[in-house]
Image (cartoon, rainbow, N blue to C red):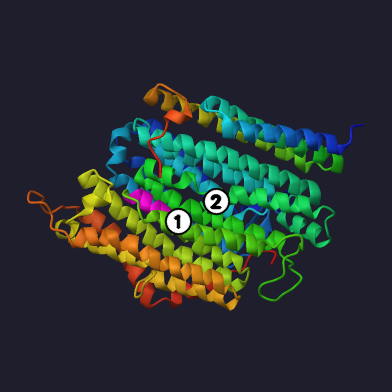
Amino acid sequence: MVEHIINSISHLYPEIAITLTLCVALIADLVLKKESHAIGWIVLGGLVITGVLVVAQTGRELSIFSDMLAVDPFAVFFKIMLLIASVLVVLFSMQSRELIDYVDRIGEYYMLILGMILGMFLMVGATNVLLMYLAFELTSICSYVLAGFTRRSLKSAEASMKYIVYGAVSSGIMLYGISLLVGITGAVSIYGINEALAAGVEQPLVLLVAGLMILVGLGFKIAIVPFHFWAPDVYEGAPITITAYLAVASKIAAFAMTVRFFKVAFLDNGVDIAGALPLVDAFNWSVILAVMAALAMIVGNLVALWQQNIKRLLAYSSIAHAGYILMGLVVLTDEGVSAIMIYVFIYLFMNMGAFYVAMLVSNKLGTEQIDDYKGLGRRAPLESVAMTVFLVALTGLPPTAGFIAKLFIFGAAINAGWLLLVLIAGIMTIVSLFYYMRVVRNMFLFEPQEEAGLLNFGLSSKIILMVMLVPTLIFGVYFTPVLEFARNSIQIFGL
Amino acid sequence: MIALDWYLALSAILFTIGVIGVLTRKNAIVIFMCAELMLNAVNLSLVSFSAHLGDVHGQILVFFSLCVAAAEAAVGLAIIIAIFRNNLSVDITRINLLRW
């Protein structure tokens, strides 16, 4: 037992590194002078060390702490995604003008981000319903506070309030689902649940209710229809750096948890073909997930059409993207999972990029209204071109990486025979072109006002922009590395 | 010895009361109390399953869920105070800057 624990700790180094960084940041916040982003640099250093430790885990495939946590290529892939997103968000935060008014408490801000990273790291590896719930709540509670960090802004406080009410209710429903699942299977690890379900359960109806209730909690975190109501309000009210983080990192982590939970707990793993049969005949998971994916694509894209605020527009677009990504889970095949991974990899860069340009514009012009983007093409050429590339990528047009992402996810769905779903996704992609291009039209087809001069954003922001722009363009043409990376990482422990 | 069904029924009733409260009440603090009621209903169901199955895992889960509920309540009340300083009200029908 002791040996098992000591052995397990040696596979937990990335999480330990994050916790230590949190402690260092906490002490540094007390010692260092306030009103500087020094803690941000400490966090960045900690994240780099964590990154090295995560990469060192490549190739391991084992379960640690008595089936609490899995260390497998699947988890490593998502941890790398989360680290890239976190590094970018910390860099954004150092430049954000919104946060300057709160610079005396900026240490707390970075510590809460670290707390979220720790929660999300545990989310992607959790193989026990207890740890799933705890990691979920750790991520959620940190993000409630972060959403309301600019607390003197009315919108931010309201966003935080709405977020915590929705969050508390959905996590309560999820915990009720977990309690029913534990009750009917008598197991807490997802492998044990799978075995119990394979042996047959007496109450399929209770299992249906439990599954749906757990789906409420996961759906809330992914922001999928019909559990998306918080997303537009929170995304609009929260500081833009946190909006980007919620839209990318916490969504990615929730997808990882959902995929692991459904694939391991609810599929018949005895059948070694791709697209194994659902264990329980009482209801069909794929159909429920497919309906949710279709609704997310329809609602997200259609409501985005009349949005005037760029953050709100990107919020609805992220709901739609959650729908596209969920298609990969609907098909339940390895091909679907690798398509999800390709999608989140590319989504990370293109969505972060769009939020970054929105933040730069908001820093300079103090506006988030799309109408105020008129004439921006003349005033900030590089940023406008970058925004255009990101929006084209989000639409999913070649030659950007967004096309590759959609290609693989649609391909996986077609191969599994979900033609209707792909049809809906295709139509909605065309609809999305309309509202993304509205932003581009405002930037390039209008003359700037007379007194408006050239906007200067500085070298560091250009470098950060390139970090996201280059992958968005390169992976659209030369996508073999992403493909290899995703295909090598689909191995989930226990499958 | 009371049968498992009665505990589960009580837990389901408490949970439903919590959900109805969250959906219908207008005071933010009462909404939080209802959310806590939901979590406590879950705790009851976990403990009764645990006792029925003779398995300790459910009870351990309850300890953690109590801690999480406390943390969530603390953060929630802090957010309510922030809202109250801005709006001088905790009536959620008056917190409506963000819509559609």
- Check residue B43 for magenta coloring: no
Residue A301 locus on image (x, y percent):
42, 59
For mark 2, give the secondary structure.
loop
In-image side of A134 versus B54 (left or right): left
Residue A268's x, y, as percent? 74, 67
Residue at the extreme top: B88
Q: Which residue was labeled with disc 1? A: A300
- Residue A176 location in percent, x, y? 69, 42
Q: Residue at x 52, y 30 (%)?
A: B76
From this view, report whether residue A479 is shown above or below residue A263.
below
Q: What's the residue at 73%, 44% (across, down)?
A: A179
Q: Is residue A283 left or right of residue A449?
A: right
Front in this rendered view, residue A214 or A386: A214
Res A81 seen here:
no
Q: Which image quarter: residue A363?
A: top left
Residue at which label 2 appears: A226
Residue in view at x 48 percent, y 44 percent: A230
Q: Is A313 within the magenta?
A: yes
Give the mark nearest the N terminus, 1 or 2: 2
Q: Which contiguous range is marked in magenta?
A: A310-316
Q: Is residue A233 visible?
A: yes
Q: Is residue A272 above or below residue A308?
A: below
Q: Is residue A281 left or right of residue A389?
A: right
**Residue type highlighted by circle 1:** Gly
How far across and how far down the image is residue A308, in percent? 31, 49
Question: The numbered mark 1 sits on a residue in which chain?
Answer: A
Residue type at tag 2 = Pro
Number of numbered discs present? 2
Q: Are marks 1 and 2 in contact (CB under 8 Å)?
A: no
- Seen at 27% across and 42% down, the residue is A97
Q: Main secondary structure of the magenta part?
A: helix
